[in-house]
Image (cartoon, helix red, strand yellow):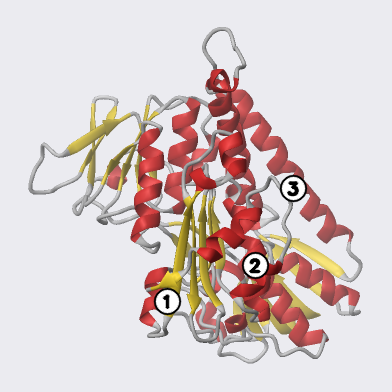
């Protein structure tokens, strides 16, 4: 006989726990299933650990630059990777324990530690026990994609998850993948002291960004001594003694790079293959992502999919927003939709890239009359005062409606400054409102009116 609940939550990423808590507050009896570590990707192998490592890497970078600021440090700057990892582990474990305690101490919530699999549209089995509910919410996240490249199974490789277990400094780290995850690891390990080579199949880094953004990021990374190998259209791997040799061209064996460690950062796949979705009748796309509508409902009534596993966003903030959408529609009389949100994200290299809305390329594809403008960070007083003048700001505007279509801030505090523009974008206000605001000096944001003043017709 099945144990009955009002709702079952499978997975404890960024949307599952707050939704379970909200439903419990509404007086519902909830089952929460977690097979491994509470907190999902973000807390355990994503945002929290990587940004903790980025902070350690920046400390080493600033220490090496201390003379630029008139500060003398005797001797070479040394990085203790065991202490770096220990700091990261402490922060991660605190977050994981906190979420586990939250769920286990919440009234009306029963936690099951194990792997949940559907046995029907209303039933899930975990640890041999059958659970039943009218509402089931899937929040199982994703994992690193291991590409089908020649030789990959025969060499020791790392992913974004296993890289976090490394407590030694790689002599030469080879990163396959020139996008967000790969570039963050590339820069942090270069700053720790490793030689780093980034191998990318495309003709530029971060192909989804505009060319000027991609080119500027490449210049920043190469300026720190990172080697970038583009157009590696046929990548292979093999061992040569203790070295991992990555081939870049199947027709030319001389085009290769040999490193001590190999990191695969070529994308992610959803954790949906072993959920028994077929028994529930839940549809997925060709890549395994669960198909959902604008309110995150699957094709099966009473089943929702949130977070990375639904393919509607690959970020912590999109997952949490999934929770907000579902909760509002269930309990607050809302009709919130995924399509209402403006896509926004950041690349946490240093300086960071903050992005919101459309890129210039995407804006051009709309056929609208456009205005666009840029401002070099070297023009920003705050950047000059901190000797961090790399990058630029960029804005694209609908010339007729005066609405801001997209922004890109590659530069000091770009991840924070970009978010101020989101308020205007969500409100649908004119970009001209920026010119009426009095900003604090000296800050990066005070240059937003200058950026607006640089807008010209495309």
Residue 446 pos. (x, y %): 65, 54
Q: Point out the frontmost of discs 2 and 3.
A: 2
Q: What residue is rendered at 11% in x and 36% in y?
A: 254
Q: What residue is rendered at 59% in x and 12% in y?
A: 73
Marking on residue 429: none
Q: CA distance from mark 1 to mark 3?
A: 39 Å
Q: Point out the frontmost of discs 1 and 3.
A: 1
- Asked if residue 446 is positioned above or below residue 292 in the image, the reply reads above
Residue 1 pos. (x, y %): 76, 81
Tell how many labels. Answer: 3
How many neighbours does mark 2 have within 10 angstroms: few (below 14), some (14-19), or many (20 or more)?
some
Q: Earlier in the sequence, mark 1 or mark 3?
A: 3
Marking on residue 95: 3
Residue 151 pos. (x, y %): 24, 45
Helix, strand or loop under label 1: helix
Q: Point out the frontmost of discs 1 and 2.
A: 2
Q: Earlier in the sequence, mark 1 or mark 2?
A: 1
The residue labelled by disc 2 is 435
The residue labelled by disc 1 is 363
- Asked if residue 429 is positioned above or below residue 229 in the image, the reply reads below
In this view, the residue in front, 240 or 125, is 240
Q: Earlier in the sequence, mark 2 or mark 3?
A: 3
Residue 364 pos. (x, y %): 37, 77
> Could you say which quadrant of the image residue 331 lies in?
bottom right
Horizontal side of 422 relative to 97 (left or right) equals left
Q: CA distance from mark 2 to mark 3?
A: 41 Å
In this view, the residue in front, 36 or 293, is 293
How many neighbours does mark 3 have within 10 angstroms: few (below 14), some (14-19), or many (20 or more)?
some
Q: What residue is rendered at 84% in x and 57% in y?
A: 102
Helix, strand or loop under label 3: helix
Label 2–label 3 contact, CB within 8 A: no
Residue 181 appears anywhere in the view: yes
């Amino acid at each position: 006989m099945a144990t009955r609940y009002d709702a079952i939550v499978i997975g404890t990423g960024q949307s599952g726990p707050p939704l379970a808590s909200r439903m419990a507050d509404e007086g519902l009896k909830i089952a929460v299933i977690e097979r491994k570590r509470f907190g999902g990707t973000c807390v355990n192998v994503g945002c929290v650990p990587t940004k903790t490592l980025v902070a350690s890497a920046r400390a080493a970078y600033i220490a090496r630059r201390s003379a630029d600021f008139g500060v003398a440090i005797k001797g070479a700057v040394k990085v203790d990777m065991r202490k770096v990892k220990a700091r990261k582990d402490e922060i991660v474990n605190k977050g994981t324990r906190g979420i586990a305690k939250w769920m286990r101490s919440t009234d009306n919530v029963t936690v099951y530690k194990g792997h949940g699999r559907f046995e029907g549209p209303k039933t899930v089995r975990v640890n041999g026990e059958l659970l039943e509910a009218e509402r089931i919410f899937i929040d199982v996240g994703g994992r690193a994609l291991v590409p089908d490249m020649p030789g990959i199974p025969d060499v020791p490789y790392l992913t974004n998850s296993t890289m976090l277990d490394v407590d030694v400094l790689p002599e030469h780290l080879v990163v396959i993948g020139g996008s967000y995850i790969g570039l963050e690891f590339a820069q942090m390990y270069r700053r720790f002291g490793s030689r780093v080579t980034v191998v990318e199949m495309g003709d530029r880094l971060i192909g989804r960004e505009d060319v000027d953004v991609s080119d500027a990021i490449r210049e920043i990374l190469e300026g720190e001594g990172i080697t970038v190998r583009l157009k590696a259209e046929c990548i292979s791997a093999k061992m040569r003694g203790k070295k991992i040799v990555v081939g870049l061209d199947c027709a030319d064996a001389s085009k290769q790079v040999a490193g001590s460690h190999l990191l695969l950062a070529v994308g992610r796949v959803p954790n949906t293959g072993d959920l028994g979705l077929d028994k529930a009748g839940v549809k997925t796309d060709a890549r395994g992502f669960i198909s959902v509508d604008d309110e995150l409902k699957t094709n099966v009534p009473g089943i929702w999919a949130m977070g990375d596993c639904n393919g509607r966003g690959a970020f912590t903030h999109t997952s949490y927003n999934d929770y907000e959408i579902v909760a509002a529609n269930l309990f607050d009389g809302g009709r919130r939709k995924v399509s209402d949100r403006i896509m926004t994200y950041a690349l946490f290299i240093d300086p960071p890239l903050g992005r919101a809305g459309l890129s210039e390329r995407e804006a051009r594809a709309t056929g609208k009359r456009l205005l666009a403008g840029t401002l070099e960070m070297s023009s920003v007083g705050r950047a000059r005062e901190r000797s961090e003048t790399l990058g630029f700001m960029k804005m694209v505007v609908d010339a007729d409606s005066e609405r801001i279509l997209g922004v890109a801030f590659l530069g000091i505090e770009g991840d924070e400054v970009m978010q101020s523009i989101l308020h205007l974008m969500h409100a649908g206000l004119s970009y001209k409102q920026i010119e009426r605001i009095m900003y604090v000096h000296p800050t990066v944001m005070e240059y937003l009116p200058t950026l607006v003043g640089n807008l010209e017709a495309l």
